[in-house]
Image (spheres, rainbow, N blue to C red):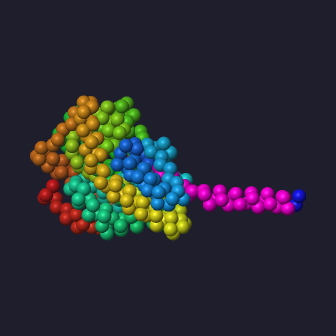
Amino acid sequence: MKVRALLLGLVAAGLTATAAAADPIVIKFSHVVAQDTPKGKAAEKFKELAEQYTAGAVKVEVYANSTLYKDKEEMEALQLGAVQMLAPSLAKFGPLGVREFEAFDLPYIFNGYDALHKVTKGAVGQQLLAKLEPRGIKGLAYWDNGFKSFSANTPITKPEDLRGKKMRIQSSKVLEEQMRQLRSLPQVMAFSEVYQALQTGVVDGTENPHSNLFTQKMHEVQKHMTLTDHGYLGYAVITNKKFWDGLPADIRAQLDKAMVEATDYANQIALDENDAALQAVRASGRTEIRALSDEERKAFVKALLPVHKKMESRVGAETIKAIYEATGFDPDKL
Ligand code: LMR
C-alpha cells in the first residue's frame, strides 16, 4: 500500500514537473489600434515569429483596439507587470516623465520617412530609448506609422481654418502647443474615445495618419481632410525591464531576433498601409480630401515652426539639436 502511494505520488510529481516545463512564458501585448494597421500587423508578426523561434516556449497574446487597456491605463499596467509589452505612440510618454519623445511631435521636424529613420535607426534613437530604463521600462524598437493629416467638418486650406475648433490630440504638450499656435482648442483624449467624440461634436476635428483615421471609421464623421503631412506619429515598443531581464538568456535572444524582424516588417508596410487607407477613405466618398498647394503648405509651415523654439524647455534644446543634426534639418527647405 505504502509503495503504491509512493508510486502515485511520484507520478503526480512527475506530471506537475512536465506541466511546469510545458507552461509557456506568456507575453501580453496590448495596444489601442485596429489589427488592420501597421502596428496591429506588426504585433501579430512579432507573435508569429516569437512563438516560432522559441518553439512555443513563449506565447504572445495580442490585445488590439483598447480591448485590454486604454492609453493611460496601459502604461500603468506595464509598470505593474499586468502586461509585458506595449507599443505606445511616442506622443504618450510625457506622463511617464520622459518628455524627450515629444520631440517627435514637433511639426515638420521630419521631411519624410528617410529623415525620420536617421533618428530611429541611429544613435539619437538609442539614446532616447535608454531614458526609459530608470522608469523600469526597456525600449526594444521603433515602429513606424506615418505622417498626419488634419480633419474637420469644414474645409481646411489655411491655418486660420482651424481657429476656434476643438481638436482632439494625444497627451503631448508639443501637440497642445501646435494646436494653440493655430488658435484651436486642444482636447487630450484616449484614442478609443475619438470616434464618438467626433460623432457627437464633443470635438470638431483631429489629426491622424490615414490608417488610424480609416480603421476607426473617423472618415464617416469628418467631412473634410487635408493632406498636411505636418507631423509624424510612430511608436516605441516597450517592455517591463524586470520581466525582460528575468527571461532566460536563450529565450531573450530569440525574442530579440523576432523583434528585429517584426520591426523591419512594420517599417516596410507602414507607408503602403497608409496609402491604401487614404485610397479607401477616398473611395468611401464620405470625406473630401484636399492636397495643399506649395503656397498653402508654406503658410502651415510658417504658422507651426515657432513650436520648435517654444517647446525647447519641454523636450530639451539638446534633443531638438541632435535630431536636427541627424536629419540635416533645414527650415529653408520645408
Ligand atoms: C492616437 O492616440 O491617436 C494614436 O496614438 C493611436 C495609435 O496608437 O496609433
In this rendering, is residue 109 above or below 201? below
- Near-viewer residue (16 or 194): 16
Q: Is residue 22 visible?
A: yes
The chief SS type of the magenta part is helix
Q: Is residue 135 visible?
A: no
Where residue 225 appears, as percent x and y from the top left, is: 24, 38
In the shown orientation, is residue 288 left or right of residue 125? Answer: left
Residue ranking furthest to the right? 1
The magenta-colored residue range is 3-30
The reply to whether the magenta stretch includes residue 132 is: no
In this rendering, is residue 204 above or below 111? above
- Near-viewer residue (83 or 183): 83
Seen at 34% across and 54% down, the residue is 266
The reply to whether the magenta stretch includes residue 21 is: yes
In this rendering, is residue 159 above or below 259? above
- Near-viewer residue (305 or 10): 10
Seen at 80% across and 60% down, the residue is 7
Seen at 31% across and 58% down, the residue is 103
